[in-house]
Amino acid sequence: QVQLVESGGGKVQPGESLRLTCAASDVTLWHRWLYWLRQAPGKGLVWVASINFDGDLDNYSGDVMGRSTVSRDNEKKILTLRIGNAKPEDTALYFCATDLRGSGRGQGTQVTVSS
């Protein structure tokens, strides 16, 4: 099964920044719009950010707006999410996907924000 591959998670302290990346091994996954989603412990999958193919349209959930940036490199097929001023509520398993339902997502990358 072809999937996107997320990486870059880990443990950070509150206030620090984190950078997540997502790689597409197959061109069929490199959609016009790409999405970051996350799943906190015991919760469902929630949309975080999205970006269009040209990278000139990006959207963020209220939880991360103002402290996050999503970007993409279409040549390398890499999607990136940067979150600044990390908060404990950012603790979640992060996925990249080709739609809001989470299609094409991989195993995810775990982010833990804790002092």
Image (cartoon, rainbow, N blue to C red):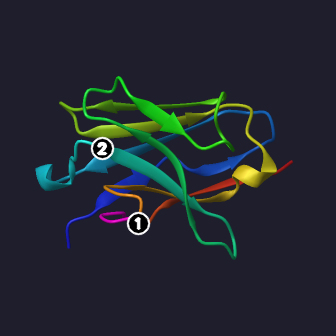
The front one of 115 and 106 is 106
> Label for residue 9?
none
Q: Position of residue 50 (x, y in %)?
A: 43, 42
Residue lying furthest top: 56
Q: Is residue 113 visible?
A: no
Q: Is residue 14 above or below residue 41?
A: above
Q: Position of residue 10 (x, y in %)?
A: 62, 51
Judged from the image, the secondary structure of the residue bearing numbered disc 1 is: loop
Identity, as a three-letter code, of the amino acid under mark 2: Trp
Q: Is residue 7 left or right of residue 91?
A: left
Split into 4 quadrants, where in the image is the N terminus?
bottom left
Judged from the image, the secondary structure of the residue bearing numbered disc 2 is: loop
Measure the alpha-carbon separation of dots 2 and 1.
13 Å
> Label for residue 33?
2
* Residue depicted at 25% across the width and 34% down the height: 53
Q: Between disc 2 and disc 1, whose residue precedes?
A: 2
Q: Which residue is mark 1?
A: 101
Marks counted in the figure total: 2
Identity, as a three-letter code, of the amino acid under mark 1: Arg
Q: Is residue 66 above or below residue 64?
A: above
Q: Position of residue 51 (x, y in %)?
A: 38, 37
The front one of 42 and 100 is 100
Q: Position of residue 5 (x, y in %)?
A: 34, 56
Q: Which residues are magenta?
A: 102-106
* Residue depicted at 44% across the width and 32% down the height: 58
Question: Please, what is the dominant secondary structure of the magenta stretch?
Answer: loop
Q: Is residue 100 left or right of residue 66?
A: left
Residue 103 shown in magenta = yes
